Amino acid sequence: IVGLSSLGAGAYVSRKVVPGKKLQSISPLRCPSRSLTSSGVPGKAGSNLLLYLIVGGAATGAGVYVRAFTKGVCAYMCSKLSHLSPAAPGTHPKVPSHVPFLLIGGGTAAFAAARSIRARDPGARVLIVSEDPALPYMRPPLSKELWFSDDPNVTETLRFKQWNGKERSIYFQPPSFYVPVEDLSSVENGGVAVLPGKKVVHMDVRGNTVKLSDGTQISYDKCLIATGGSPRNLPAIERAGKDVQKRLTLFRKIEDFRRLEKISREVKSITIIGGGFLGSELACALGRRARTRGLEVIQLFPENGNMGKVLPEYLSNWTTEKVRREGVNVLPNAVVKSVSVSGNRLVIKLKDGRKVETDHIVAAVGLEPNVELAKSAGLEVDSDFGGFRVNAELQARSNIWVAGDAACFYDIKLGRRRVEHHDHAVVSGRLAGENMTGAAKPYWHQSMFWSDLGPNVGYEAIGLVDSSLPTVGVFAKATAKDTPKSATEQSGTGIRSESETEAEASEVQLSESSSPTPHVPTQGEDYGKGVIFYLRDKVVVGIVLWNIFNRMPIARKIIKDGEEHEDLNEVAKLFNIHED
């Protein structure tokens, strides 16, 4: 088309310059039938047809060249920009048949492993196969900061202000960080590619191959299983039928946040079942809307108080009152018997005869590790804790590692464990990545976890934190600095583990302090800040830092040493809880 248009232009120019002749309409594809005197020196014979062909041909060539050049530029730019957004539905990038490093799962543990592998082997080629359609992202803000955003488009931008006011995205890295899947085998210096929306359904350990849900097969040299877990449901809700299921949220992913945020704007009442980390955080987040939008928020759970499985009773009771002050109707000692639909509302019947009417239910009752691959792979699942059973190096086989929620690992200090927290995903993923590149390091670095009940009350914990263990609590009055908001202002990050997990326990020196002896608050006093020690055989195996931040390396050192302490008041002084 470009060439023919140019040819027509050439014909027009050729006819226009003929002197003494009227301009005639001609077809650009029709050659003149007779010779014309060329414009120039009279008496000189010349072929206007030749001029016509030269001009038209040159224009045609230029048109062809321009078309080829622009087509090439377009193709080049498309190839460079194609990976900056997810593939359109129905498109299938060419998946490499073999990768040196295959990571199954696209969560925090997989991303931490990929980053660790690339740090130790800068030319490594890493493929992440993720059932989630999104690129790797952090989960904590889904139940924390995102709910406190004033941005009406937060469900689309997924950007939030941390307690310290700094803004960030929930994604670990922008799309440009990743290599297109089809280029992974050929790109110079390797890279990390993500294949989203695909599930590994079969694993051949002997043949070092996996099969995806679409039938694609990929072979690997080394493999990480970081499949995470799926939210548990209550049997009473599972039996209730489709009408109830339609009004249920099992909170785990970005889409769950988007859906619940939308629902919270449309209904009059939401009931959260579960008194653990997730349930209590969501209750506080939604409670904020209870005051501003007239939303009724109910939280019910079988324990005596919020975080009843983690915190000692007195602190659990205090936390329950705190959640109530956030605008939540908290119902402890509540065991769900049945759920039904009556009219346009859900009716939750409790075992003690109480009834709760609501419009929507959020079940936050724990996580079930995703271990479906165990059967085809012949990998062991731990009968006590669940998850893939691995050794202290996180190995399930000589070239297969497991990290994150799905790993039941051997902790050389605290024994066999399975942990479901963000920082554990970071720590175990990083260790697995190091060991996949030859480090052969055992799991010794105690991961921490944290929970914030809004910007003013939060705690960090490490080790075995179980309310069934004996505890010793030492508290002091809080200051304005003793809040999650203040902690993030000091550390510069809302994901507090990012700033503290690099600290080695050996770097912390335990020394005597001249601080006054702390005390446990009496009835009516506020639990402003403090340290709770969890004991097993008189040895500290877990520590909760209540509104005390940036002291986790000290807690890690205490647990690593595994020593008996005659007076835990003296140990509590190490955390400087009486600092102004």
Image: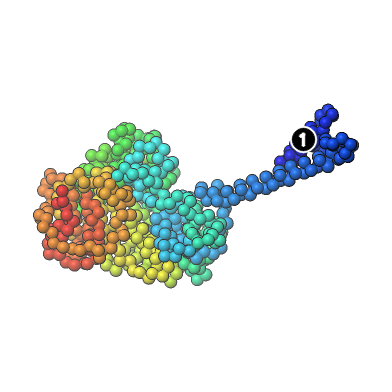
Query: Mark 1 belongs to which amino acid?
Result: Val
Disc 1 crowd rating (10 Å Cα; few below 14, some 14-19, many 20+) is some
Residue 185 appears in the figure: yes
Is 415 situated above or below 338?
Answer: below
Work out whether residue 501 or residue 15 is closer to the camera in this orientation and state it. 15
Figure disc tally: 1
| Residue 48, position as x, y percentages in the image | 84, 38
Res 552 quadrant in image: bottom left
**Residue pictured at 15% horizontal, 54% vertical:** 474
Work out whether residue 31 or residue 427 is closer to the camera in this orientation and state it. 31
Work out whether residue 425 or residue 123 is closer to the camera in this orientation and state it. 123
Residue 296 appears in the figure: no
**Residue pictured at 41% horizontal, 55% vertical:** 107
On screen, residue 256 versus residue 492, left or right, reads right
On screen, residue 519 versus residue 494, left or right, reads left
Scheme of colours in the image: rainbow
Where disc 1 sits, the SS reads helix
Res 50 quadrant in image: top right
Is 538 situated above or below 73?
Answer: below
On screen, residue 571 versus residue 165, left or right, reads left
| Residue 488, position as x, y percentages in the image | 28, 48
Which residue is tagged 1?
13
**Residue pictured at 55% horizontal, 47% vertical:** 88
Is 104 situated above or below 88?
Answer: below
| Residue 441, position as x, y percentages in the image | 35, 69
| Residue 315, position as x, y percentages in the image | 19, 50
Quarter holding the N terminus is top right
**Residue pictured at 12% horizontal, 54% vertical:** 518
